[in-house]
Image: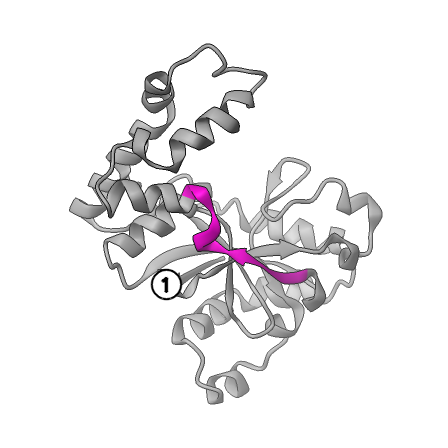
Amino acid sequence: MLIDINPRAIRRFLHLRHQYLIEDTVNTDLNPSRYKGKRFTGLIVPDEAIQTGREVEQCPHFRGTIQRFQEGLDWNQTEYKHLYETWYITMANGKYQHKTFEDFYAHRLKSWDAIFDDIKTNGYKITKPRRDNVEIALNDLGKPLLIDGRHRLAIAQILNIKKIPATVNILAESLAKQDLNKLANSRPDENLIKALADHRHRLTKQLRNKDIKSRLATAIRSAYPKNHSTAKQHG
């Protein structure tokens, strides 16, 4: 489920509260974008499961990206230097333990320089694979909460891009049930109305089921559309 959104409207992360998803067997295998390793989009969950998390600007990955591309610092002058020394170096069974920051730059950060240059030159497009899009949840008021895509979100804000495509992985049940005509009268973002209308069939199909597992089956199919030919890549 895709929606066009102003990147500056995404201000906080999602805090997914698993205790409101009921089935214990689901809780252990479900994260905000995958169930048992399979991606999903447009999963309808109880309103209470979608809670507001910390501010995006508090995230060191987001701040490091701002420091690099807005303030013009070298990567080793950004918060990524500290992140590397305290976090990344412990990841992947110590994969980076005997590597220098320059190795880390070449393996991981260099690609963001290329992505920034590509977006700056060619504009912001839907990515292929779709998992590289900014991923969000929509709460009962239709407000977006960030799941993943901190770097691309920061880049879009730096370049003052007014609208980006975002993948809606999760949305609140009361929002999915909204009568679109009544919702339109409350004057929400027109892109929200369009996204709900475009996916009304799959949302209605999910709403026929109360349990999360049954809804997941539809949401997983939505993540693997048959036609990928229109998707474009950042580079």
Looking at the picture, does residue 77 appear above or below residue 47? above
Question: Would you identify the image quadrant in which residue 138 lies?
Answer: bottom right
The amino acid on which the numbered mark 1 sits, given as a three-letter code, is Arg
Residue at image location 68% in from the left, 49% down from the top: 217
Q: Within 10 Å of the Cα at label 1, are there few (<14), some (14-19), or many (20+) other Cα atoms?
A: some
Q: Position of residue 197 (x, y in %)?
A: 49, 71
Is residue 213 part of the magenta span, yes or no?
Answer: no
Q: Which quadrant is the C terminus positioned in? A: top left
The answer to which of 218 and 56 lies nearer the viewer is 56
Between 208 and 39, the one lying in front of the other is 39
Can residue 235 be seen in this snapshot? no
In percent of width and height, residue 104 lies at 38, 21
Answer with left or right where residue 128 lies relative to residue 202.
left
Please say if 145 is above or below 111.
Answer: below
The structure residue drawn at horizontal position 41% and vertical position 66%, both measured from the top left corner, is 9
Q: Nearer the viewer, residue 77 or 42?
A: 77
For the point 58% across and 82% down, the residue is 179
Left or right: where 3 falls relative to 183: left
Q: Secondary structure at mark 1?
A: helix
Residue found at x 46% / y 42%: 131
Taking depth in this image into account, of 205 and 71 the one nearest to the observer is 71
Q: Position of residue 41 (x, y in %)?
A: 56, 52
Q: Residue 28 in the image: x percent, y percent?
A: 76, 41
Colouring = one colour
Residue 82 in view in this figure = yes
> What stretch of residues is rendered in magenta?
50-61
Eyeballing the image, is 70 above or below 183?
above
The quadrant in which residue 60 appears is top left
Question: On the image, numbered disc 1 is attached to which residue?
Answer: 8
Tell me if residue 46 comes above or below residue 22 in the rendering: below
Q: Residue furthest top?
A: 98
Q: Is residue 52 magenta?
A: yes
